[in-house]
Structure formats: C-alpha cells, structure tokens
Image (cartoon, coloured by chain):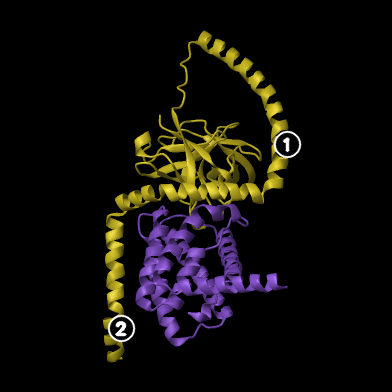
C-alpha cells in the first residue's frame, strides 16, 4: 500500500514538474522541433489507413491558446518553416498558413474562451480541417489534382486521429493550468 | 469604425508586414535555405529513423514473423525462376549476337537510404542520405529493385528530396507492356496511381503490366511501374483511365536506387 502511494506521489510530482516546464516559452521551441522530427520519422510507423496525426499543427493551436499573440506568432512561424523544409512547392505554404492560423486564433480567443477540454479539441479539429481545405485549394491552383474522395478520407481521418492522440496527451498535461 | 481601423493598423499591421517580409525572404532564398536546413537535420533524422525501425519491429513482430516464413518460401521459388531466366538470357544473348543487335546499356545507379518522410498527409516524398557529393542531381529518376519510385526534386550536399510516384505533383509517360498502349501515369495521394488519357478503344486489360515508355526525358524505357487494377470511363466520356497498383510498396521503402546515367 505504501509502495503504491509512493508511486502515485512520484507520478503526480512528475506530472506537476512537466506542467511547470511547459509554461516555459523556450521549451516549446524544442517541443515543436521534436514533434516535427517525430512526424517525419517515428509517426510513419503509426499510420492508420495511410494517414498520420497532425501533431505539429495541434501544438501550434495549443501554443496560441497558452501564450500571448506575439510569442505564439513566432512559434507558429517556426513550425511552418520546419514543415516547409519538406514541402515540394517552392512557396512557403505552411509558413503562411500557420501564421494565418496564429493570427485568427489570436483574434478568436479575445471573443471566445477556450477553457474546457472539449472546446480545445473542437478548435484543433476545425483548424486541421481548414488547413486541409486551404491545401487542396492551393493544390488546385498549382494544377495538382487531389480527388474529392481521397481528400475527404484524408481530411476526416487526420482530424479524428489528431484528436485521438491529443486526448491521450491531455491526460498528462493540464491545459487549464497555463 | 475609424478607431477599429487605426487599432487594426497599429497592432496587426506589424504582424502582417513581418509575415509578408518573411514569406518574401523565404521564397527568394528558398532553395539554398531549405537545402542547408536539410543538411543540418541529416543527423537527427537518421537517429529518429533508427528509432522508427526498432518501433516497427516491436509493434509488427508477429506480422514480420509470418512474412519472413512466406518470403523464405518465395525465395526458394524465385531461385528456380532465376535459373530459368539465366538460361533464357544466355540464349537471348546468343541470338542477339547472331542478329548483330546493339547491346542495351545497363543503368548506372547510386544506392541510398531513406532517412525521413513527408511530415504531413498532403504530399508524398522522402529524404535520402545521398546528395550532390555523391553525384545526384535534380530531375534524376529513382527506382527500387521492384520498380519506379519517383524523381529527385531537390539536392543538398548530403541529402536529396524525392517526390514519390503517388504524389499529385508527379507524372510520367507509361505504356502497357503487352499492347504498347501509351498513357500518362499520375499520382493521386492514395495507394494507387492513375493512368490517364487512354483512348476509348485502348487495348488495356486488368492485370496488364505498365512500364515507363521512355518518352519522358531522363526516364529509361522499361522500368516497371505497376499492374492495372481496374478500368473506367473518365468524366468527359471521351476516354478511359486505369487504376494502377504500384509495383513498389511506397509506404515501406527503406532503400532506393537513383538512376545517374
């Protein structure tokens, strides 16, 4: 019994320590870099129906809810920049999209409060879907054809998969503490 | 309203200007910038790729075990086929010599390992651990032992970016091996490829083998692309298209061969 209590105390201490570290702005630069590396390598092994979660984009949304608009904006640009390294197109699509999302979420948070976990998940899902719609529009303009069926499948799956991954993450990190 | 516009200018115009300046700077210096960053990321990507392989090994242990048994059986079968093919090759060589035909040039290739993949679901590309130093140039076709994989779109000193054949940005001229019917092979982001611009009376059937036609510059003739899965009429009703299953499992490529010559 004592051992269980001790283990639980250590676990809560660890969770608390992690949460306090997450308040640190500098840590998020590292987190974005790490998630980007994970998306390009490790998450490849966890594809479901050929789709993997958009963790970097979800973290960009969370950053915009945690930090003030200036700080969040620069972090979003950093995330977009990293994504653009792997892009085929010559223009910084992800950089501009992430900057736009940062700006829009910044405006939105002034009017709506995102405190409940479900509302945050809803916002992330919306951003993932909007990101997909924007990308398809850009593909269309650049002459690349992504068929509607494939587009809808990827869009729905990546939204749901991202939410599933974040629901697990939210069990460890309390967002309302920030 | 005026106050709102003023406020908007003061606060958000700076953001817009910064974004615009960054975008401009980024798009101008993009090739050099991206290539340099890719070279820097070479090390960490290799480490994470190793972790991914180990993770896959653990997660899919049972599947790998069954696959190994099946492959062992297949190897025995293929060994017999190789012996037969060797016999036929020698016979073919003798006949060619008799007819004074020119010898086909063998392809000069560079082998490379895949160190990363596209982080999003909207493009299909890979990063390999060989670049300009090894003699890789932009536009070179890439294949594996099983068939066509894609083409090089960017090269750094030690890394290169390759667009896979299922990317919507990719297209190559292909022909049906049996009937020599030509078409354009395009990526669709999905698991399969599309062979477009086939005439209504095209001589093409399910299970037909599709190879490169040699009409697209730099792509040698006869590289295996895949097999026809199904056929359908296109939206205009003027022609047909075929759904092609790639010969290479694009989600499981670990090593590729860049065709240099």
* Left or right: residue B159 compared with residue B224: left
Res. A107 image quadrant: bottom left
**Residue in the picture at 28% in, 91% down:** B3
Decide: is B158 above or below B261.
below
Q: Colour of chain B?
A: yellow
Q: Nearer the viewer, residue A68 or A26?
A: A26
Number of marks: 2
The purple-coloured chain is labelled A
Q: Nearer the viewer, residue A177 or A133?
A: A177
Q: CA distance from mark 1 to mark 2?
A: 67 Å
Q: Are marks 1 and 2 in contact (CB under 8 Å)?
A: no
Residue A79 picture location, percent across and down: 41, 63
Res. A83 image quadrant: bottom left
Q: Earlier in the sequence, mark 1 or mark 2?
A: 2
* Helix, strand or loop under label 2: helix
Q: Mark 2 highlights which residue?
A: B8
Residue A129 picture location, percent across and down: 52, 69
Decide: is B107 above or below B166.
above
**Residue in the picture at 70% in, 40% down:** B67
**Residue in the picture at 44% in, 87% down:** A111
Question: Can you see residue B71?
Answer: yes
Q: Residue furthest front?
A: A2
Residue B172 picture location, percent across and down: 47, 41
Q: Nearer the viewer, residue A117 or B230?
A: A117
**Residue in the picture at 53% in, 77% down:** A120
Decide: few, some or many residues near mark 2? Use Cα within 10 Å; few <14, some 14-19, many ≥20. Answer: few
* Left or right: residue B82 compared with residue A27: right
Q: Mark 1 highlights which residue?
A: B69
Residue A138 picture location, percent across and down: 42, 62
Decide: is A91 above or below B36.
below
């Amino acid at each position: 019994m004592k051992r269980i209590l001790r283990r639980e105390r250590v676990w809560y201490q660890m969770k608390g320590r992690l949460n306090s570290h997450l308040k640190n702005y500098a840590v998020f630069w590292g987190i974005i870099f790490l998630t980007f590396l994970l998306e390009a390598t490790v998450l490849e092994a966890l594809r479901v129906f050929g789709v993997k979660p958009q963790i970097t984009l979800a973290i960009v949304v969370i950053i915009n809810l945690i930090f003030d608009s200036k700080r969040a904006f620069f972090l979003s640009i950093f995330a977009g920049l990293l994504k653009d390294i792997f892009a085929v197109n010559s223009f910084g699509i992800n950089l501009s999209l992430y900057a736009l999302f940062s700006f829009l979420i910044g405006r939105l948070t002034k009017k709506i409060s995102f405190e409940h976990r479900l509302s945050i998940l809803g916002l992330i899902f919306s951003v993932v879907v909007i990101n997909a719609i924007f990308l398809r529009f850009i593909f269309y303009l650049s002459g690349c054809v992504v068929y509607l069926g494939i587009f809808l499948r990827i869009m729905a799956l990546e939204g749901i998969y991202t939410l599933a991954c974040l629901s697990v993450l939210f069990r460890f990190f309390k967002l309302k503490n920030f | 309203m005026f106050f709102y516009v003023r406020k908007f200018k003061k606060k958000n115009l700076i953001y817009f200007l910064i974004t615009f300046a960054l975008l401009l700077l980024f798009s101008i210096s993009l090739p050099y910038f991206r290539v340099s960053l890719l070279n820097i990321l070479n090390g960490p990507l290799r480490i994470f790729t190793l972790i991914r392989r180990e993770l896959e090994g653990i997660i899919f242990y049972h599947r790998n075990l069954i696959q190994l048994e099946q492959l062992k059986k297949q190897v025995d079968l293929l060994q017999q086929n190789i012996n037969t093919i060797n016999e036929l090759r020698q016979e073919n060589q003798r006949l060619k010599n008799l007819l004074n035909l020119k010898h086909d040039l063998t392809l000069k290739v560079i082998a490379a390992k895949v160190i990363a993949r596209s982080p999003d679901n909207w493009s299909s590309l890979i990063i390999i651990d060989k670049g300009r130093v090894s003699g890789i140039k932009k536009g070179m076709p890439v294949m594996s032992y099983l068939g066509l994989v894609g083409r090089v779109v960017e090269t750094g000193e030690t890394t290169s970016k390759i667009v896979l054949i299922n990317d919507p940005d990719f297209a190559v001229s292909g022909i049906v091996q049996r009937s020599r019917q030509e078409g354009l092979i395009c990526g669709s982001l999905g698991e399969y490829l599309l062979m477009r611009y086939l005439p209504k009376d095209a001589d093409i059937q399910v299970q037909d083998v599709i190879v490169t036609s040699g009409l697209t510059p730099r792509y040698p003739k006869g590289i295996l692309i895949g097999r026809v899965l199904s056929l359908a009429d296109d939206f205009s009703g003027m022609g047909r298209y075929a759904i092609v299953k790639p010969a290479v499992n694009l989600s499981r490529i670990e090593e590729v061969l860049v065709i240099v010559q």
